[in-house]
Image: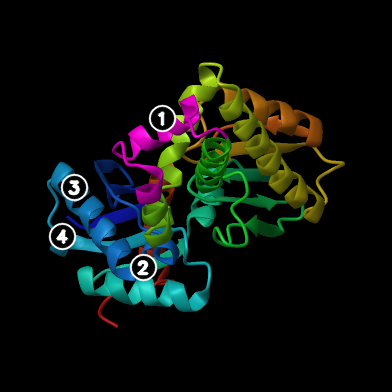
Amino acid sequence: MRWVIGFDGGGTKTDCVVAAESGEVRGRGQGGPSNPFRIGFGAALASIREAAAAALEDAQANPADVAALCAGLGGVGQPSDAEKMRALLATEFPHAAIRVCTDLDLLLAAAPAGPLILLVAGTGSAAIGRNVGGEVVRVGGHGPMISDEGSAYDVGRRAVITAQREYDRTGKNTVLGERILREMGSVPWPELRKRIQAAPDEVFPRLFSVVAGLADNGDEASQGILRAAAYKLAEIAATLAERLRLNETKFALIKSGGMIGRSKYLDAQLQERLRIMLPNSETKNLEIPPAEAAARLALEALYSGSAGKGAK
């Protein structure tokens, strides 16, 4: 039996699906982050390998029988980066047809037909959409230095700034400050600053859960941070709606990413901002999980010959 594999990878985790040629999903697995822009190509490949091994074991499938794969990953928007990842995947699956696309492309493939906007709120933030004429446009997702407004990275960064500023002012930690330091192993502020300077991606996104929990329990500082994040995320969607000329058209609005569904406070704030900024939108869900959409794209690549062969 020949198999196809689909990967959905971002800044936090990598989901993997193994399917038969019939399209039936037979196995699932998960690995660590696989956005090469944020963690490097070697680490991204290691996470993909981890997810694939788990999914193939779940399906009781032989890796040598993988005929095609599609990897939808954050951080491969540039053609050169996509080609580099394709070449690395070819070393893992030398006989497979290989397709590499962005994680946003996967969301489009998993979404219903028609005009829509997909807002992604995870480690980073971005949006991709399609208008009535079929034109596809993406905004955001350019990395934390110049983009990713309202993301988990942004929330964590704002939380540290807020808590550190209050500590500098009073010499005492707020509830937010105490929880941040506890989450990072009860380290003092100087040690946390060193960790941030060395590896901010390992600190800031992790702190989103701290802010989310405190906000849901009424902490005003945390609620303020999430209100600002909701506004920034809604602005990304509104910018895309303007680019796609959707302001006079009914369209679907889909929210995705690791921040969604993690905080009742954030979900409510974001929904309200989107209602105000995008009154013509209708909230909908993806039709299938993105990793399953990747497996379907792998099947298309297998039969259309549109992907490069691993043995190339």
Mark 2, other Cα within 10 Å: few <14 / some 14–19 / many ≥20: few
Question: SS class of the residue under badge 3?
Answer: helix
Region rendered in magenta: 170-192
Q: Comparing marks 1 and 2, which lies closer to the viewer? A: 1
Residue nearest the viewer, comparing 109 with 122: 122
Label 4, on which residue? 63
Q: Amino acid at mark 1?
A: Arg
Give the Cα separation between the discs numbered 2 and 4.
24 Å
Label 1, on which residue? 179
Inspect this view and state whether residue 10 appears.
no
Q: Earlier in the sequence, mark 1 or mark 3?
A: 3
Give the Cα separation between the discs numbered 1 and 2.
30 Å
Query: Does the segment drawn in magenta span residue 188?
Result: yes
Q: What x and y, as percent, mark residue 204?
A: 45, 47
Question: SS class of the residue under badge 4?
Answer: helix
Question: SS class of the residue under badge 2?
Answer: loop
Label 2, on which residue? 40
